[in-house]
């Protein structure tokens, strides 16, 4: 009886330990989970660095924001807003996180640019070949330390690395090396989810097919970020479905961090891919939560209504998706 009691006690303690390990938001296999239960998240890319306020996102039933940080060099991590060298007021990352958390929103902090200038946006660049790389690593480390083990704050290590046409000498081995280094910088400070971007400015998932499993070896809480513009949206629905199936069969955890109807001046229809992602339980974030009907990618008009101006009814389509019941992976 004593042995049986000890055995039951040991099992009970093990169960409690396992429950603690999966508390909060985590990646388990290829699923985003909350307290070990699979979830699907629908969100938007936001600009709260320029003005904190996420209450309106709740009216659209959104779950997650991917925050545009375009001036990593100067954007304060904490404290009051500052006027940067581009004459822009920048709000602190802690203020953004606090606002989102108050509205039950997950925050993805994503570095889009080094100093707020177009020339030094991260998109299309090899991280290690930028003049600001070492300083950026210091800032990335500070982000991770500041939000250490806050499971509702996820950090993306870079936005849209490498040229869309691979004319910069890109190889999957370069991606594997660069992303491993950036992952480790963040992981050394926090256990929370880390987002890793795809190649070809975020749109090429073939790197995940080729070396995604190798990248995941020995790593935890990794979510791969795919961006869906012309390399996805002008493809046939059958091909898009097959591409998603390949990712699923590889057991890769993926998130569509950007999707919008216009890129490089081309108007596209996101609705077929939106439907596929919704049905497959994949989480996603639209580009862009902005009140401006003159921007075809903006989700809202200046009056706060869905923006359907010359964009295949983008605002209404995405709002309808967001208001639907979530369909997490089984």
Image (cartoon, rainbow, N blue to C red):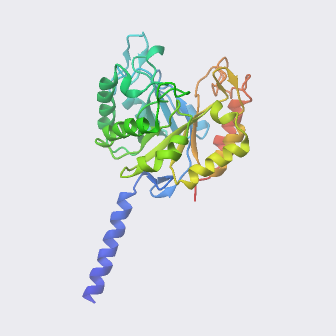
| Up/down of 92 relative to 146, above or below | above
Q: Residue at x 69, y 23 (%)?
A: 266
Q: Quadrant of the C terminus?
A: bottom right
**Quadrant in the rendering for residue 265:** top right
In this rendering, the count of numbered labels is 0
Q: Residue at x 43, y 46 (%)?
A: 222
| Up/down of 282 relative to 226, above or below | below
Looking at the picture, tell me which residue is in the foreground, 141 or 171.
Answer: 171
In the image, farthest residue toward the bottom: 1
In this picture, residue 61 sits left or right of residue 211: right
Residue 41 at least partly seen: yes
Q: Quadrant of the N terminus?
A: bottom left
In the image, farthest residue toward the left: 2
| Up/down of 248 relative to 267, above or below | below
| Up/down of 58 relative to 151, above or below | above
In this picture, residue 301 sits left or right of residue 126: right
- Residue 116, percent across and down? 43, 16
Looking at the picture, tell me which residue is in the foreground, 174 or 149.
Answer: 174
- Residue 169, percent across and down? 46, 28
In this picture, residue 52 sits left or right of residue 14: right
- Residue 314, percent across and down? 69, 30
Residue 156 at least partly seen: no
- Residue 80, percent across and down? 35, 22
């Amino acid at each position: 009886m004593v042995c049986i009691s000890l055995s039951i006690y040991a099992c009970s303690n093990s169960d409690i330990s396992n429950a603690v390990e999966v508390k909060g938001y985590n990646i388990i296999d290829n699923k985003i989970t909350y307290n070990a239960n699979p979830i699907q998240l629908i969100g938007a890319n936001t600009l709260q660095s320029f003005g904190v306020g996420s209450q309106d996102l709740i009216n659209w039933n959104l779950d997650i924001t991917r925050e545009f940080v375009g001036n990593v060099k100067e954007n304060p991590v904490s404290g009051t807003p500052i006027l940067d060298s581009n004459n822009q007021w920048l709000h602190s990352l802690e203020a953004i996180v606090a606002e989102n958390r108050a509205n039950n929103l997950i925050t993805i902090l994503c570095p889009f640019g080094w100093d707020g200038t177009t020339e030094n946006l991260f998109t299309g660049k090899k991280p290690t070949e930028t003049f600001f790389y070492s300083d950026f690593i210091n800032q990335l480390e500070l982000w991770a330390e500041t939000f250490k083990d806050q499971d509702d704050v996820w950090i993306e290590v870079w936005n849209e690395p490498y040229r869309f046409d691979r004319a910069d000498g890109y190889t999957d081995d370069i991606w594997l090396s660069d992303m491993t280094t950036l992952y480790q910088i963040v992981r050394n400070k926090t256990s929370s989810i880390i987002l890793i971007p795809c190649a070809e400015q975020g749109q090429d998932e073939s790197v995940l097919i080729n070396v995604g499993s190798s990248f995941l070896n020995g790593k935890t809480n990794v979510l791969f970020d795919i961006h869906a513009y012309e390399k996805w949206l002008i493809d046939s629905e059958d091909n898009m479905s097959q591409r998603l199936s390949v990712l699923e069969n590889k057991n890769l955890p993926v998130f569509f961090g950007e999707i919008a109807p216009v890129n490089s001046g081309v108007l596209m229809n996101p609705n077929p891919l939106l439907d596929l992602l919704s049905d497959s339980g994949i989480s996603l974030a639209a580009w862009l939560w902005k009140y401006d009907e003159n921007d075809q990618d903006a989700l809202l008009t200046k009056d706060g209504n869905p923006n359907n101006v010359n964009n295949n009814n983008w605002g209404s389509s995405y709002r309808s998706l967001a208001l639907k019941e979530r369909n997490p992976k089984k």
